[in-house]
Image: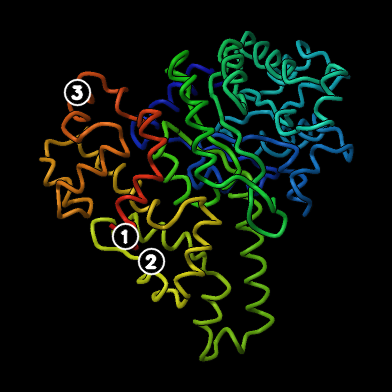
Amino acid sequence: MTTKTDILRQFHSQISVTGHIIGVAAGSGMTTKYSVKGGADFILALSAGRFRQAGRPSLASYLSYANSNELVSDFATRELLSLIDEAPILFGLHATDPTIDLESYIAEIRMQGLAGIANFPTVGLIDGDFRRALEEDGIRYDREVEAIRIAHEQGLLTLAFVFDEMQTKDMIEAGADIICAHLGWNAGGALGAKKLRTIEESIAIAHRIFRVCRDLAPGRIRMIYGGPVKTPADAQYFYEQTDCQGFIGGSSFERIPSEKAILNTLQAFKNSDEVFGKNSDAADKAMMHDYITFIQNHIAQNYQQTITLNEMALLLHLSPPYLSSLFKRRLGCSFTEYLIRFRMNKAAELLRTTKMTVSEIAEDVGYPDSAQFSKIFKKYKGHAPRVYRSLAVSEPEAPAEATEAAQATDKAAATDEVRGKEAP
């Protein structure tokens, strides 16, 4: 059996090569089999995944429709362990279940051959009067921390879903190997959450959690899960904006792709005359196009060039105001803010990793005027480019994130620099 040390060594090697690892929260052998073939670094066996496979929302895992631990134990051991041995499988442990003894139950999980545990379902996703009532009866997040501590002492891999700085500190002290900022239920598809944080709000949460990780345990792996992150472009934006080292997806890998594939395939068979008719391209675009993901990918591939909202709107056959509102609603920031942040992150990477001059970097990220570039860079990163580079050489961790003051000026900077424009 592969040891926790071996697994973590593999994870860190993967991070050193690609910058991140990927986990899949699965509810079936089919999802697990093809996730591992696709490159998943580990699998989370969660009761939420089992409910998704039944066509129910992930939230069902929080209600008394089934015993979460028994559900996970059944499909994780009979269906997943017997199917794959290339990737570690973690047990989604409902630690606050009052009917189990954590010490002995976690020992059973280890004896079954599972690589580790994660605290799910977690009371961290519950708030308000119901959360207070649960805590009064002893159903508290503290018990999840205790489960991580016990699993750590028993030599299991431990992944902790956290929601704030205090929980992060507690989980680090308990020995969690992976700290995962849980950003809430996934959006998207027929069963996704209808209200959720924007990407910018989620980035702010991740910044606070990862700052605690860097301060207390810089060697622990930092990941994100759920919320508004549902496409590769979303995840890439997170990697560039934070110290995130990986993404865990549930609905993003299992439910949403299945919904789309089944729906589109059945519609194609049902309406074959439309599929093969002269209007098939337009019908396909209307059905399949994710406008914001298209723009994110376009920016990632063409950020050196002039990019404007008007051009994007024309390309997608949408009005600029409508596209602008879609972008703001989806990502929590304007098109211009997103473009500037993307370019400044690319510039920061070049300053840290190359010997290009400031003028060369400015032009490389789409700013022919190096003076304008330097002014915007300082507002977004807290230092002028040359100072940022010198700090990167002397203190590699120091310039990785803008100072609090610089972060506070992000939106002001965008407004100052692009007032009356669509892109810098």
Residue 349, relative to residue 96: is it above or below?
below
Image quadrant where one finds the C terminus: bottom left
Q: Are marks 3 and 2 in contact (CB under 8 Å)?
A: no
SS under mark 3: helix
Residue at 19 percent across and 30 percent down: it is 389
Figure check: 402 above or below 266: above
Marks 3 and 1 sit apart, C-alpha to C-alpha, by 31 Å
- Dot label at residue 309: 2
Q: What's the residue type where badge 2 is placed?
A: Leu
Can residue 86 be seen from the camera position used here? no
Q: Earlier in the sequence, mark 3 or mark 2?
A: 2
Three-letter amino acid code of the residue under disc 3: Val
User: Mark 2–mark 1 contact, CB under 8 Å?
Assistant: yes
Closer to the eye: label 3 or 2 = 2
Q: Residue at x 15, y 55 (%)?
A: 368
Dot 3 or dot 1: first in sequence order is 3
For the point 81% across and 35% down, the residue is 71
What is the C-alpha distance between the residues marked 3 and 2? 37 Å
> Based on the displayed image, in which of its 4 quarters is residue 18 positioned?
top left
Marker disc for residue 393? 3
Nearer the camera: disc 3 or disc 1: 1
For label 1, the crowd category at 10 Å Cα-Cα, with few meaning under 14, some 14 to 19 and many 20 or more, is: some
Q: Which residue is mark 1?
A: 423
User: Residue 3: x, y in percent?
Assistant: 53, 18
Q: Secondary structure at mark 2?
A: helix
Which percent across, then down, holds residue 222? 49, 28
Instruction: From the top left corner, tell me how far across and down residue 149 is, in percent.
Output: 65, 11
Label tally? 3
| Type of amino acid at the residue the image marks with label 1 | Ala
